[in-house]
Every structure is written in structure tokens, then in C-alpha cells.
Image: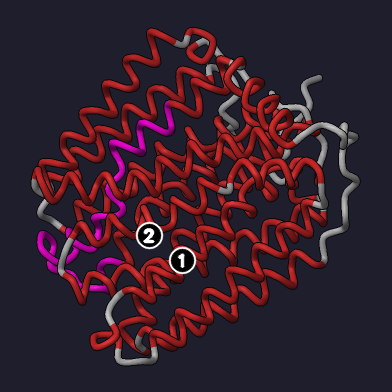
Amino acid sequence: MVKKHDPFEALRYKDFRFFLIGKLLLTIALQMQALVASWMIYDQTKDPFALGLIGLTEAIPALSLALPGGFLADRYNRKRLMLIAVFLMLIASIGLAYYSFLDTISIGTWPAYVVIFFIGLARGFFNPAQSAFWAQLLPSEKYINASVWNSSLWQVGAVTGPAIGGLCYAWFGAGWTSTLVCILMVVVFISYIFIKNKAMPEVDKTESIAHSLRTGIRFFFKQQILLSAVSLDLFAVLFGGAVALLPVFADQILHVGPQGLGFLRSAPAIGAVIMAAYMAFHPPAKGAGKKMLWCVAGFGLCMIAFALSTSFIFSIIILICSGMLDNVSVVIRSTILQSYTPNEMRGRVSAVNSIFVGSSNEIGAFESGLAAKFLGLVNSVVLGGCATLGVVLVTWKAAPELKNLDL
């Protein structure tokens, strides 16, 4: 008799539930904060390159500290590292809230960039710790379902965060919206406190930092499935992502203002939540590699269609579709990362993964702003979507283990 699939099996673990609550609220807070910062900067500069600099400002500290953060996540209490990182994010958010209440035009945009830089610093330690920590909260046979819920709650936060942020910005202003961000981060801190401490894996503490990091990096690059899955995501989002340019599309192409920007930023996450609900009942286990490749190709096509759209409704629909396709890739990649990595190396391997993901998001934002400045807004996104299709084709030919993967 075949055992019936339980779509809620991962949620039956209390510590994992607290982890997801914190993840959801932190995502909402950071998405709201990103919207406030990006709109304040764009409102003052009217320059798409200034939006690209937001991504670079956050990426530099986040990527620089990812490997040291991964080393710490394999040596020290992962829950404690998460709490320290959230506390640093809270301090930075208080700084942004204070700046938001001032005369920002006379001060300039530099305080917003400083806050974004410190958020990046905190993320450099937070990302490897949380990625390594959640796998300790439930058995390995629950990883696919846990990855679906982990991604789903992040996407729910990505849906509600920009929408709430855009509406609050329009109704109450940047200052009170930033204050709400601070309150949410306090609740995140409390939710992580309720998670029980987990025993750290046995490691050789006499091993030097440099040797430990080299061991984690070598392991990552020797695993073709890990390397190809993460590389596919890196280049697809690096070339095909258009999130950093959404304020420009909202202002110059679609003419919908900050309220419309909130819905544009939420649209991919709406699609991801829809897909996550489907995957909770129908996990993408069989033919996972081919599904991942086809979905990334579909994501590239969506970016091309979005760039050419002049309709707000059609743009929303396209972004929803892009989120549905992207979430399949996210869940499969997350499951591969946890399933193919030993517990004692999860921090370092997660750090390498966060460098790839951080590169695709923040460096991709910088690339988008730079390309838009020199190629034009629409042309830059169309060419990025075409480059994504090229990346899929190369991966299909060069990574047979990923193409033939079943989870």
C-alpha cells in the first residue's frame, strides 16, 4: 500500500514553525524597507543607475562576509548567530526610520545607502546560519516538503511586504512605514528565541579557518549537481531579473506611482505562492532536473514579455507567471542543497550558495541599472531575457547529472 503524501508534514515540527514565522516577518520587513529605500532614492535622483547602486551597496558586505559567516555557522551556535544578525538589522532599520522623518532632500541619499550597507553586513552572517539551521529542525525525509514551505513563506512575505510597504508609504509616509519595519524585526527576534538550541555537529576545531573554508569550497565545486543548479539560478537572475528596475517601469512606462510599484514587486511572489500551494500536494521530485531547466527558460521568456508590455494589468500577469516558474527552481535548488550536503559542512556550503544567490540578486540589480543606463530600459531587460535562454541551453548540454536528476 502506497503511503499517502502529507502536504503539512514539515509544519508538525514546532521549532520549524517558529523558524517559518520569523522568516515570514523578516521577509515582510526587509521587502517593505527595500521599497521605502528604493522609492526615496529614485524620488530624489530619477536615475535608474542609482537603483542599481542599491544592489551593489548591499552585495559588497553580504558577499564579502558570506564565507566567514559560513565558517562561523559550522563552528558556533547557529541560532545565536541568527539572533545577532537580526539585532544588527534592527539597529540599521532604526537608523533608516530616523532618516525618513528628516528632510531627506536637503540631506541627500547617502544615509539610505549606509543603512543598506549595514543590512548587507548582517545578511553576510545571517544567510549561512539560517540555511544551515533549518535542516536541523526536522528529519531529512521531510526536506522537500520543508523546502516548499520555506520557499512559500518567503514568497508570502515577498507578496505582502511590497504591497504593505507601498500602501503605507502612500498613506503614512516613509517614516511611519520604517517604524513598522522596526516593530516587525523585534517580533522576528522573539520568534527565534523560542526555537530550541540544536547540538552542533562534531568538527575539528584545530583546523585553520583557511583550510576549513577551502574544504567547503572544494566540496561544493566537486558536486556537479550542486554547482550546476546554483549556477543556473545565478546566471538566470543575473541577466534576466528586472526587479531593481521596477520603480522606473512604474514611473515611466506604466505610470502607476509607489502604490503600483508595491503591486508590481508583489506580483512574482503571488505567482510563487500559487505554485508553492500546488507543490505542497505535488512535490517536484520526479524529473526535477528537467522541470528546473524548463521553468528557468520560461522565466526568461516572461522577462522579455514584461519588458515589451505597456499595460499594467498584463505586466502584473506576466510577473505572476515568472514567480510561478521561478519558485519551482528555488524549491528544487534548496532541496538539492540540503540533501547533498553533510550537516557539518552546511554552513560553508550555504555560504558559497549565498554568494551565488547574492550575486544574482544584488549584483544583478547593479547590472540591470548599468545596462538600462547605456542600452535603454526596455532593451536591457529584453537582452537579459535572451541571455537567460542561452544559459538554459548551455546548462542542458553541459550538466547531464542535473538534467537527469530525480529527487
Residue at which label 2 appears: 266
Q: Secondary structure at mark 1?
A: helix
Pinpoint residue 195: horizontal percent, then vertical percent: 82, 60
Amino acid on which the number 2 mark rests in the picture: Ser
Q: Which mark is residue 257?
A: none
> Up-down: is 130 above or below 328?
below
Q: x and y percent of residue 70 in the render?
A: 67, 42
Can you identify the residue that label 1 sits on? 160
Quarter of the rendering occupied by the N terminus? top right
- Residue 363 vs residue 73: left or right? left
**Kind of element beneath mark 2:** helix
In the visual, does 331 lie left or right of 206? Answer: left
Depth order, front residue of 189/67: 67
Number of residues whose C-alpha sits closer than 10 Å to that of mark 2, classed few (under 14), some (14–19) or many (20 or more) = many
Q: Quadrant of residue 257?
A: bottom left
User: Is 407 on the left-hand or right-hand side of 93?
Assistant: right
Residue type for callout 1: Thr
**Residue at left 74%, top 46%?**
72
Q: Please tell me which residue lies in front, 72 or 150.
A: 72
Residue 235 part of the magenta segment: yes
Decide whether the magenta segment is chiefly helix, strand or loop.
helix
How far across and how far down the image is residue 406, in percent? 60, 16
Q: Which residues are magenta?
A: 232-261
* 125 sits to left or right of 55: right
Residue 237 vertical position relative to residue 402 in the rendered view, above or below: below
The residue that appears at 30% across and 57% down in the rendered structure is 53
Mark 1–mark 2 Cα distance, whole angstroms, equals 7 Å
Quarter of the image containing the C terminus?
A: top right
Residue positioned 17% across, 44% down in the render: 371
Q: Are marks 1 and 2 in contact (CB under 8 Å)?
A: yes
Q: Is residue 177 magenta?
A: no
